[in-house]
Amino acid sequence: MSSLRPFHPLDLLRLNLANLDVLTENYDISFYLSYLAKWPTLMSVMESSQGKIMGYIMGKAEGTAKDWHGHVTAVTVAPDYRRLGLAKTMMDELERVTTSVYNGYFVDLYVRVSNEIAIRMYEGMGYSVYRTVVEYYSSGSGGGGGGGGGGKVGAEGEADEDAYDMRKPMPRDKRRKSVRENGREVRVLPHEVW
């Protein structure tokens, strides 16, 4: 049994199980707290009946005009709790809040092009690739974040990696202008992304 609840600052001391994954970005405490202060309704945790954090999601509202949207900064589930639908539950809540609280046109997220399992999961939730952000993830970074490495090669000889900007239209986007058919072919540089 698990329950979805709002993220609390003390949860930062209990994220280890969920953050022990090479594809999960680990942020410093001030980053989490800044999100919690600005967008508390877009941060949730999944907690087991024993009080263990099984996963969490953090997001924000950003953009202007027709680009006003919810953004998934991080969603992660501890390895022992995967394939139980927890990520979908957390994503559904973020989408609900994006619609009901922020009245966003869409929800977006970034995912490494090599993370095929996550891409399939997001596609199963109704997300599609809007564009490819060239060299968004630096070779030394984990799963989230990014910002473009500019073609550098990391210490292990790994080149920077592209990201897919995946989007799902919300009810406000009645004409579905926030999505496109050929997103994998549309390539942009990190500085071209707001």
Image (cartoon, grey):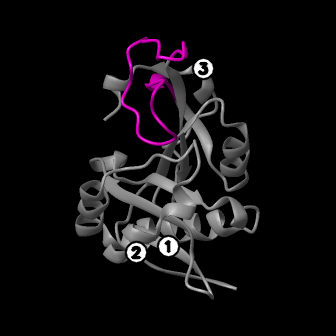
Q: Is residue 119 left or right of residue 168?
A: right
Name the spot of residue 91 as percent of width and height, x first.
56, 63
Screen quadrant of the N terminus: bottom right
Disc on res. 7: 2
Q: Amino acid at mark 1?
A: Val
Q: Tag 1's secondary structure?
A: strand
On whether residue 27 falls in the magenta region, the answer is: no
> Which SS type dominates the magenta stretch?
loop
Q: Residue at x 66, y 30 (%)?
A: 114
Q: Tag 3's secondary structure?
A: helix
Mark found first going from the N terminus, 1 or 2: 2
Do tag 1 and tag 2 residues touch (Cβ < 8 Å)? yes
Disc on res. 185: 3
Name the spot of residue 145 as percent of width and height, x first.
41, 40
Q: Nearer the viewer, residue 58 or 103?
A: 58
Numbered range of the magenta stretch: 132-159
Q: Tag 2's secondary structure?
A: loop
Do tag 3 and tag 2 residues touch (Cβ < 8 Å)? no
Q: Is residue 73 left or right of residue 171?
A: left
Name the spot of residue 2 as percent of width and height, x first.
64, 82
Label 2, residues with CA under 10 Å away: few <14, some 14-19, many ≥20: many
What separation in Å lies between label 3 and label 1 (alpha carbons)? Answer: 35 Å
Q: Is residue 36 left or right of residue 110?
A: left
Q: Residue at x 47, y 17 (%)?
A: 155
In the image, residue 97 sits, relative to residue 193, either above or below, namely below
Q: Nearer the viewer, residue 165 or 24?
A: 24
Disc on res. 45: 1
Q: Is residue 171 visible?
A: no
What separation in Å lies between label 3 and label 2 (alpha carbons)? Answer: 37 Å
Q: Amino acid at mark 3?
A: Glu
Q: Nearer the viewer, residue 115 or 88?
A: 115
Label 3, residues with CA under 10 Å away: few <14, some 14-19, many ≥20: few
